[in-house]
Image (cartoon, rainbow, N blue to C red):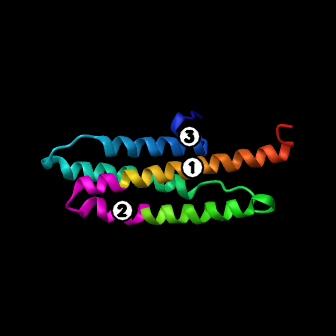
């Protein structure tokens, strides 16, 4: 039995980073007015892996001293998924492509900040489990 690299599991942070990078590339791709339809579809397809990455996030334990942070993270994740979903039809139909591009770049920055907060939360959990740096 042969196992290809595409069938191997990807670490969530790697998958998220790749999805975010793919959407960045799609948004930054140059296009002319006659190519706007192709750009729109490329961006729309790049949004799918970002949504999937957000939906499969690991949230760890919600008990103990970090439960409030976990709750905030879950609410933030849900809001980001809703915002991304709302852009689905907008990307394909909105007449001002530059406005769509700027809005999605802002959303992408917000998602990147959320991912960083997730990493910080996971680090704090591990630090607390092993007794910190003292």
Which residue appears at 31% of the width and 65% of the height? 89
The percent coordinates of residue 93 (x first, y second) are 24, 63
Asked if disc 1 and disc 3 are in contact, CB closer than 8 Å, the reply is: no
In this rendering, would 9 be left or right of 101? right
The percent coordinates of residue 21 (x first, y second) are 44, 41
Can you say whether 49 is above or below 10 in the image? below
Which residue appears at 19% of the width and 50% of the height? 36
- How crowded pointer 1 is (Cα within 10 Å; few <14, some 14-19, many 20+) is rated as some
- How crowded pointer 3 is (Cα within 10 Å; few <14, some 14-19, many 20+) is rated as few
Name the element at disc 3: helix
Q: Which residues are magenta?
A: 84-103
Residue 87 is tagged as 2
Residue assigned mark 1: 115
Report the quarter where the N terminus lies: top right
Residue in front for this viewpoint, 53 or 72? 72
Which residue appears at 28% of the width and 40% of the height? 29
Name the element at disc 2: helix
- How crowded pointer 2 is (Cα within 10 Å; few <14, some 14-19, many 20+) is rated as some
In this rendering, would 75 be left or right of 49? right
Sequence-wise, which precedes: disc 1 or disc 3?
Answer: 3
Reply yes or no: does residue 91 show up in magenta: yes
Residue 14 is tagged as 3
Sequence-wise, which precedes: disc 1 or disc 2?
Answer: 2
Q: Measure the C-alpha gap from mark 1 to mark 2.
A: 20 Å
């Amino acid at each position: 039995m042969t196992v290809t690299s595409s069938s191997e599991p990807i670490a969530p942070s790697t998958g998220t980073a790749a999805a975010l990078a793919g959407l960045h590339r799609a948004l930054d791709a140059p296009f002319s007015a006659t190519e706007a339809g192709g750009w729109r579809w490329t961006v729309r397809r790049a949004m799918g892996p970002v949504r999937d990455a957000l939906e499969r996030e690991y949230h760890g334990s919600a008990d103990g001293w970090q439960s409030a942070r976990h709750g905030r993270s879950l609410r933030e994740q849900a809001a980001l998924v809703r915002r991304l979903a709302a852009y689905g039809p907008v990307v394909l139909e909105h007449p001002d492509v530059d406005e769509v591009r700027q809005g999605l770049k802002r959303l992408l920055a917000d998602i990147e900040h959320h991912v960083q907060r997730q990493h910080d939360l996971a680090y704090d959990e591990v630090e607390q489990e092993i007794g910190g740096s003292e």
